[in-house]
Image: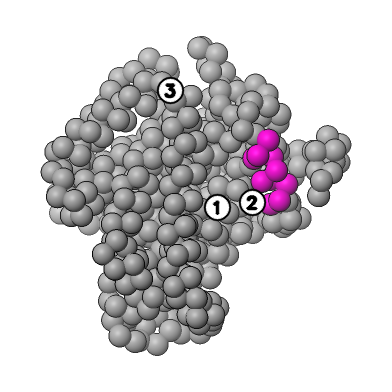
Amino acid sequence: MNVVTEAVNWLNGLVWGVPMLVLILGIGLYLTLGLKLLTIFRIPFGFALLWRGRTALGRGEISPFGALMTSLSATIGTGNIAGVATAIFLGGPGAVFWMWMTALVGMATKYAEAVCAVRYREQDERGKFVGGPMYYITNGLGKNWTWLAVCFASFASIAGFGIGNMVQANSVADTLNTSFAVPEWLTGGVLVLLVGAVLLGGIQRIASVASALVPFMALAYVAAGTVVMILNVEAIPTALLLIFTHAFSPAAATGGFAGAAVWAAMKFGVARGVFSNEAGLGSAPIVHAAAQTKGPVSQGLVAMLGTFIDTIIVCSFTALVILTTGAWTSGETGAALTSKAFDIALPGIGAYVVAVALAIFAFTTMLGWSYYCERSLQYLFGVKIITPFRVTWSLAALVGAQLKLGFVWLLADTLNALMAIPNLIALTLLSPVVFRLSREFFKTRGKSEASPF
């Protein structure tokens, strides 16, 4: 087992290493420039479409708003709380700057993913819309590329049970046990019932729950962060100065912080940014393919907001809370660092805010990833796999809640990164289609829709 663990650990370092991060950033930058910065300049228009998209706008299974909330349910999670803290601990305050840069180019990647997902989606034998990287690889690049689609679906279906299920269940159980002394087995049992009840309703119920929980949990977390920053308002300019200064100059050791080079700030900022918003990994387009949208570009403009909301907004609040309270020099890392920061500002309740947020974030991540995993397995085995999958997925939460999952996390994290390779290849090859559809949209129909701006 040690040999297997070492092999997977080596592969993890490779797939999450410099070449992968350069590839993700490079393709994101290529798409951003190819779209002529559309994904940055059209952010207001994207929010206008999101507001209109609360109801159905075309053929599909769920509203555009529901699709984005389901996507966010899978991305707003431990990465926003533990991931940001880890990036600051390992890379210093400058890592936050590189997280922002990753998000700005990642918006173009997420946009292109959704455009391709809607453009090349299809209906299964039940009449349900299905799509994502495996479908735009097969339908967009041709049957000769089916092997690449199979690779993506295989990586996603296995990674989902780890990073999207058992690891999340374990996080919920550990958080509730530490903060409220709730037994792990009880948390696991409740998760089985809650997750199973939602999955029985399919994507419509997942989207319905996500549409209620995601805005609530994100706004509540941001509100708590706002209170902390109001209490430490005089420290905000210094925190921002630290972010911009240490993005381009080394951060010296201070207190419990060991110091970090510029390269560390860049590496961990990019890595944790990608881990948090999943731009380029190919997960989000699976749910955006089910949106009741007028067309590919409309949904792409909505989809790109997922990266903006996840990283530019939610992750920034975590970072500023950690920096303004001075907790970043405490020597803590991960969720413990974020918890300490909130507790410094809000003694007695701050740690509980983080505990509850982690539990809800992890639960909604399980819902979002269930859909990604289900559609990946459906691509491989057909609709007959759906019911057995939903039962297995629900029961896996009970196992995950009670086990130590070091190897499961390592394997899932590795496969999660491997998902990006087929997806990025497809996006690069299909980029001319994305550019053409975008030009046509804003030249014709898009002009009238975009008129308020």
Q: Residue 214 at what x, y percent from top left? A: 46, 42
Residue type at mark 3?
Gly
CA neighbours of label 1 inside 10 A, class few (<14), some (14 to 19), many (20+): some
- Of the numbered discs 1 and 3, the one sitting upstream in the chain is 3
Task: Say which residue label 2 marks.
Answer: 108
Q: Residue 107 at what x, y percent from top left? A: 61, 52
Please report the bounds of the magenta region as a residue range.
Answer: 43-52
Left or right of 64, for residue 169? left
Task: Say which residue label 1 marks.
Answer: 309
Left or right of 40, for residue 10? left
Q: Residue 199 at what x, y percent from top left? A: 37, 25
Measured along the vertical axis of the image, is residue 247 above or below residue 127?
below
Left or right of 350, for residue 449? right
Q: Residue 348 at what x, y percent from top left? A: 26, 64
Residue located 61% across and 58% down the image: 105
Task: Say which residue label 3 marks.
Answer: 202
- Of the numbered discs 1 and 2, the one sitting upstream in the chain is 2
